[in-house]
Image (cartoon, rainbow, N blue to C red):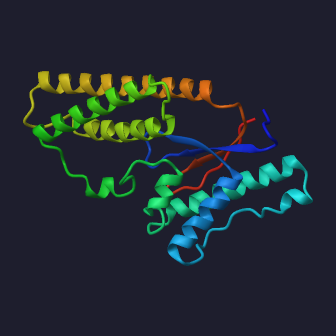
Amino acid sequence: MVLNDYHLYNIEIQFRPGVHVHKLSKRFSDFVEFKKELEDSLHKTIPYSLPSKFTALYQSRASTIEQRRVGLAEFLNGLLNDEQLRTHKLVGEFLYLPENTFTQEKEEQILSQIEWLEVSKEVKALLQSVRSKLFAKQANVLECKRTLDTCEAKIDQLNRYVHNDELGAGEIKRRKAIVDQQRHECNELRVLSRGVATATEKPTFKRSLGKAKETESTARSRK
């Protein structure tokens, strides 16, 4: 679908195998503004280029869209593989990434029994907060999606430490049930957030950039 003669590009980011895929959509002009803002903040030019804005003047629309799709995927892959740039605050804000997305794994320590329960309680509170916000009259869908991304990261952390040598079989089973329930609720709220976004946003034409990974560059298109 086309609206006001502009296109949206779907972005999919997967940081590690087995971890959920982070999804969002951006216009080409969003990338242009973001790159300028990032370079202004750094006071230097970053070594990752965007497709030229002027190709649309002498290429067909389909060719322009495809060239931009490939170029934007390369730009994001370069940015997310750059250990210095990817942790910049503006990168996280542009991609709606949870805080400490790239540092969490390095800083993360094994959870004690008490810490595991505290993280579980935190996830429960965040999920309740998202549910309340989605049913508000003016729901901030982007904020809710970022909170859900944080929840999924914490649920993944809980899942990694379900097993503990000091725990009995009954407690391990209870922990697994908690993780499964919280993941189910998180997925349910994510579906609900898409419904809220659809009800409040105008339809747009979308193209997919494909999955951007830390260690592997990929791109694909949806028709």
Place residue 204 in its image quadrant: top right
Relative image position of residue 223 (x, y in whole percent): 75, 35
Name the residue located 65 percent from the left edge and 49 percent from the top edge: 219
88, above or below 63, in the image: below
How many numbered marks have been drawn onto this rendered protein structure?
0
Quadrant of res 122: top left
**Residue at the extreme bottom:** 44
Residue under the point 48% across and 30% down? 139
Task: Please determine whether, in this image, residue 18 is positioned above or below residue 187.
Answer: below
Query: Of all residues shown, which one is farthest toward the front?
Result: 137
Indicate whether 58 appears above or below 169: below
Instruction: Tell me residue 181's x, y (percent).
Output: 31, 22
Q: Which residue sits at x=35%, y=37%?
A: 151
**Which quarter of the figure is the N terminus placed in?**
top right
| Left or right of 1 on screen, residue 98 | left
Residue 11 image position (x, y, % from top left): 60, 45
Question: Residue drawn at (26%, 37%), measured in percent from left and top?
Answer: 158
What is the quadrant of residue 130 in the picture? top left
Q: Is residue 119 left or right of residue 129?
A: left
Compare residues 130 and 77 and report the one nearer the observer: 130
Measured from the top left, where is residue 108 in percent x and y? 25, 52
The answer to whether 122 appears left or right of 68 in the picture is: left
Query: In the depicted view, which residue is nearer to us: 107 or 146?
Result: 146
